[in-house]
């Protein structure tokens, strides 16, 4: 979850927000390993999956934003289920 959030923030708001978010995600991941709550392989797999989900969300966000602001000044968001 932390890597999905960090990736989404990085893709939408840029590196000024993304780098601190990634540092926090790395801290969370390393603390899960240190506390023996997850194996290293679990954390790596979660980071890859979270990054993929975050990029997919950001891509959908940018697509909806471009469509919504294309011809009319309205703003709408669509959350696929």
Image (cartoon, rainbow, N blue to C red):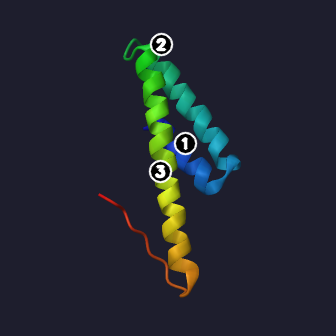
Q: Which one is closest to the eye, mark 1 or mark 2?
A: 1
CA gap between label 2 and label 3 equals: 30 Å
Which label's residue is closer to the chain start, 1 or 3? Answer: 1
Q: Name the residue under label 3.
A: 56
Mark 1 surroundings: few (<14), some (14-19) or many (≥20) residues within 10 A = many
Residue beneath the point at 52% across and 55% down: 58
Residue 48 is situated, as x and y percent measured from the top left of the image, at 49, 32
Foreground residue among 43 and 31: 43
Quadrant housing the C terminus: bottom left
Residue 38 is situated, as x and y percent measured from the top left of the image, at 38, 17
Residue beneath the point at 44% across and 44% down: 53
Foreground residue among 56 and 10: 56
Mark 2 surroundings: few (<14), some (14-19) or many (≥20) residues within 10 A = few
Q: On residue 34, which mark appears?
A: 2
Q: Is residue 43 left or right of residue 22?
A: left
Which label's residue is closer to the chain start, 2 or 3? Answer: 2
Seen in the picture, residue 31 relative to 3 is either above or below; the reply is above
Residue beneath the point at 47% across and 13% down: 34
Residue 44 is situated, as x and y percent measured from the top left of the image, at 48, 23
Mark 2 falls on what kind of element? helix
Residue beneath the point at 39% across and 67% down: 78
CA gap between label 1 and label 2 equals: 21 Å
Q: Is residue 46 left or right of residue 73?
A: left
Which label's residue is closer to the chain start, 1 or 2? Answer: 1
Q: Which one is closest to the eye, mark 1 or mark 3?
A: 3
Q: Mark 1 points at which residue?
A: 6
Foreground residue among 74 and 21: 74
Q: Is residue 10 left or right of residue 68?
A: right
């Amino acid at each position: 979850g932390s890597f999905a959030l960090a990736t989404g923030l990085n893709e939408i708001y840029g590196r000024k927000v993304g780098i601190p978010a990634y540092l926090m995600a790395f801290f969370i991941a390393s603390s899960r390993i240190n506390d023996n709550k997850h194996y290293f392989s679990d954390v790596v797999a979660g980071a890859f999956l979270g990054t993929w989900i975050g990029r997919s969300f950001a891509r959908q966000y940018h697509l909806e934003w471009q469509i919504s602001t294309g011809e009319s000044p309205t703003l709408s968001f669509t959350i696929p289920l």
